[in-house]
Image: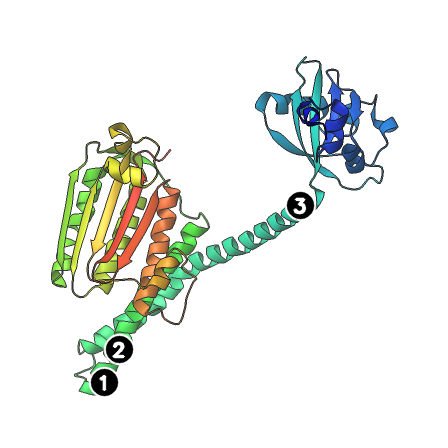
Amino acid sequence: MNLFSLFKRPKKEDIFEIFPDGIVLVSMDGKILDVNAKALQILGFSKLDLVGSYFSQYVQGGSVLLNKLIQNSQSAVTKAANPKKEDLFVEISAAKSEDLEKVYVSIRDITANYKHQNMVNGEYEIAKKIIDEKNSFLTGISGEFFNLLNSVTSFSKALNDGVVGELNDKQSKYVSIINKNSNELLYDLEKLFKYFEVESNLYQYENKNIDMADLLSNIAKGYEAPFAKKKLNYSYDLTSFDTRSAKTDPVAVEILVKNVLDISLKLTDIGTISLNAGNPPIEFLELKDFENPNEDTAKKYTLIEIKDSGFVLPQGALENIYNPYYLDDKMSKKTISAKITLALVLKHVKNLKGDMWVYSKPSQGTLVSILLPMENA
């Protein structure tokens, strides 16, 4: 074996034969100068047909597409001609030769994958349209559901309040159960219908210039009395803001913060709830894989952390926390309510170009961390 042959520069003919893709050599005026065997196999024409003809006769986009690919150093999917006049989709990329007098074009047949992807995309669009129509319908008639449930809730409360006279113990017990169940169902349905609304982009966001610290302070103060009524320890700290000015949707921010606090208000009986907010520490941004974060980076974000020591999510629910449709036989009513609510919160967070993390461990409780940009461009 001649070892020196391994270091010889391969000839053009060798490259044409060993390269896995089709190769077409095109002149600067758009004529095909040469092709390899793989290109002939893909296009289905003979070398006699191709050489001397214009590239645009066989590949849609022609020289205009090639110039664009050369300038952007990208590849593109386009249609190509073939003798059987069947659909042929190819992925092409292009580069100029060293003397800048020719263009090397690689061609890969992706017809099967392209058709499959189009089929998948078509099925996805059909499914999405059905989901959007379903969500629009349910959102539109949600008022009817709530009116019916409010009637049950109000009537059961009226019975317990003695509107029709004093109830005996057994009657009072059943009426209390009806009132409790209808209230819980009303809560879950409200969250679910709101999720439907956001899922299908029926909620219209409106960005405004706001003071983020003031907004969060007003929300936090509003929960002092409800938590005190349940005898839960509640605190909040909003002193970590260096930059308070923001441009975002204040209603959406209020919705997502209130929803997290509502989980604690509804599901926690004993424990400590805290809300802390401000510009995030640089260490937090590093932990979340921000590239070279600094103080200026931190000022562009708001970090909202709500911790509840009295409520813990099971591991199965935590792994599927953002999917409100995932259920298993181990999930309690509390877990289902929390999942629906947190899925709604995440939808708003993502639409505000932010991110969210949920941590939950026995003996430690649950922590919800929400990172929002100060400007939702």
- Judged left or right of residue 191, residue 230 is left
Quarter occupied by residue 59: top right
Give the residue at mark 1: 171
Picture quarter with the N terminus: top right
Quarter occupied by residue 65: top right
Mark 2 vs 3, N-terminal side:
3
Q: What percent of the width, then of the height, locates residue 214? A: 19, 39
How far is disc 2 from disc 3 in space, using C-alphas? Answer: 57 Å
Give whichever of 54, 236 is nearer the camera. Answer: 54
Mark 1 vs 3: CB contact within 8 A:
no
Instruction: Indicate which label's residue lies in the foreground, 1 or 3.
Output: 3
Label 2 element class: helix
Q: Amino acid at mark 1?
A: Gln
Mark 1 vs 2: CB contact within 8 A:
no
Q: Residue at x 74, y 23 (%)?
A: 12
How far is disc 1 from disc 3 in space, using C-alphas? Answer: 66 Å
Give the residue at mark 3: 113
Q: Amino acid at mark 2?
A: Ile
Q: What percent of the width, then of the height, locates residue 368? A: 27, 51
Q: Residue at x 38, y 59 (%)?
A: 192
Q: Amino acid at mark 3?
A: Asn
Which residue is farthest right? 48
Q: Is residue 81 visible?
A: no
